[in-house]
Amino acid sequence: MGNCPLLTIINMDRTNLGVEPFSPEIVVNPRVKALRLGWNNNMNDECLKMVSYVCPNLEALNVTYCPGITEEGLLQILKNCLQVRCLEISKCQGVKNLELHFELPKLEVLQAEGLTIDDETLASIGKRCGRLSRLNLEGCLNVTARGVEGVIVNCKVLKEMNLRWCNNVSLDIVAWIVLSRPSLKKVTLPCVSVPSANQKDFFLRHGCLVCQG
């Protein structure tokens, strides 16, 4: 990146990142805003720590399907890269607990499909990410209504929430979600929840499209 000082977007999906060690000549590039590192099976936390050093002004990070990274690497990058607005960590099986103990005031989009996060983790995300507008929890099987409530109460500009396959969240809470957070425009329900036509109309009258998962 030292030879490309004007580079702002880097796509390294499926490039076997992590197999070879980083060059000792790597330099900081504060212009890089977006980095795609998805589908790299060998990428680990050390790679993320290097990213946090090289790209301090990162705004968008995609590490989808990177099983070698854990919450340790993600928390390191979130602490060092304070401009992150979009974080895509779906299917990162090594991430077990992403409980936050520091503010992420600029995070707007969190794609966390298929993670083992629980209600405590979700509640911490709600408390620390006040500007969150899109949250994808599809397939987060440990999430219940209690964790969802924590997000709804604290994320005052939330527009979209995907709860597909979150089968511990019942249809009973959806009306409360829609009425409690007027900013919501779309909610995707767990697959076991089937809203009636009257319920869908009720939600639409309050400005929210509720879809069956």
Image: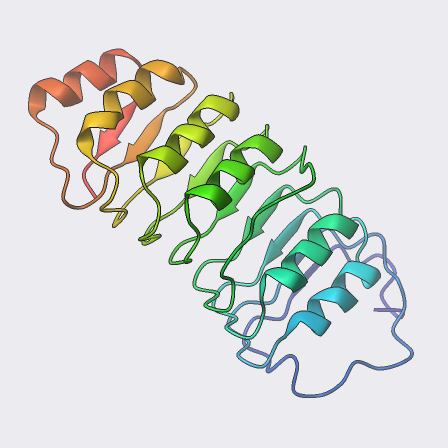
Q: Quadrant of residue 182?
A: top left
Quarter of the image containing the C terminus?
Answer: top left
* Farthest-out residue, bottom: 20
Task: Point out residue 66 in the picture as x, y percentages from the top left corner.
Answer: 52, 70
Residue 54: % across, % down: 82, 62
Relative to 50, residue 59 above or below: above
Foreground residue among 213 and 174: 174
x and y, in percent, of residue 15 in the image:
59, 79
**Colouring chosen for the image of the structure:** rainbow
What residue sits 60% from the left and 67% below the top?
37
> In the rendered image, which quarter contains the N terminus?
bottom right
| Front in this rendered view, residue 183 or 166 | 166
The residue nearer to you, when weighing 116 against 22, is 116
The percent coordinates of residue 188 (x first, y second) are 28, 38
Task: Say whether residue 111 is left or right of residue 191.
Answer: right
- Depth check: give the residue in front, 62 or 153: 153
Q: In this view, does 90 lie above or below 41?
A: above
26 relative position to 121: left or right: right
Residue 55, visible in the rendered structure:
yes
In the displayed structure image, the side of residue 7 where residue 159 appears, left or right: left
Tell me the residue at 47%/43% (across/down): 120
Rendered residue at 65%/62% (across/down) = 72
Which residue sits at x=72%, y=73%? 46
Say whether residue 159 is visible: no
Quarter of the view holding residue 73: bottom right
Exactly how many numbered labels are in the figure? 0
